[in-house]
Image (cartoon, rainbow, N blue to C red):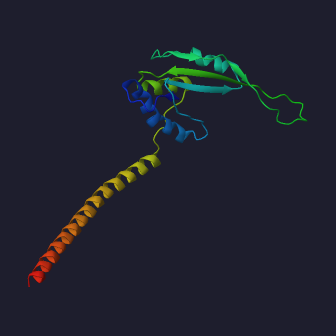
Amino acid sequence: MRFPRTEWSLSNQGPRMFAKDSLPRLKYHNPTLPIRVEDTQSSTLELTFESADKASLEKLQKRDDSDNLEDEWTEIQTKPQEPADQASTSTSVPIFTRNGILGLKGKHSREIWRWLEHKTACKDVSITPQDDILRRKLQGIARKSAADRMLVKAGMDALRKQQAELKKAREAAERLTSEA
């Protein structure tokens, strides 16, 4: 993914939100998936597909886009492979690659996600009962920590007030001893 990360404008808002919200979620559920975000002037999302089946890569471009987002597709290329064993006479299955490129300028993050979802046929991960239990537990911890922060703040305020009163009392005592 490429977009001008340091330039704050409305045309970069969608790519910025997609990179912030969707890419970490995608990486969490697919840890081996290589994801790279680069700071460049052009705003594009480039997906590289690899498959041993050339026909499946040809179908990628033909999928209907419900959002009518303009995307570009490279020609299918054969990825060079090293033989598994020099002594082996078996031929390895060729790996084919193809890139899909989507221009991101002015696109909303949901549009980008729908394009990615449509082209890769990925599905949102459903919430499991364990996830729901963990979410409730974290919400309880957040509520308790908010109450704890208020208690600590009240204690610190009382301590600061006591220190200020002690300082005033010392100054008053010094004045009395210096007058005498």
Name the residue: 47% across, 44% down.
128
Name the residue: 49% across, 16% down.
65
Side (left or right) of 145 relative to 87: left
Determine whether 100 is above or below 39 in the image.
Answer: above
The reply to whether residue 63 is visible in this rendering is: no
Residue 18 is situated, as x and y percent measured from the top left of the image, at 45, 31
Quadrant of the image for the C terminus? bottom left
Give the camera-side residue of 1 and 69.
1
**Splitting the image into 4 quarters, where does residue 174 fall?**
bottom left
The reply to whether residue 162 is visible in this rendering is: yes
Determine whether 106 is above or below 126 in the image.
Answer: above
Residue 103 is situated, as x and y percent measured from the top left of the image, at 49, 20
Name the residue: 34% across, 53% down.
142
Residue 34 is situated, as x and y percent measured from the top left of the image, at 60, 36
Give the camera-side residue of 153 and 40.
40
Side (left or right) of 71 relative to 89: left
Determine whether 21 is above or below 97 in the image.
Answer: below
Determine whether 34 is above or below 73 in the image.
Answer: below
Give the camera-side residue of 91 and 167.
167
Please identify the residue farthest to the front as the structure is shown: 179
Side (left or right) of 44 relative to 139: right
Residue 17 is situated, as x and y percent measured from the top left of the image, at 42, 32
Name the residue: 13% across, 80% down.
173
**Splitting the image into 4 quarters, where does residue 159 fall?**
bottom left
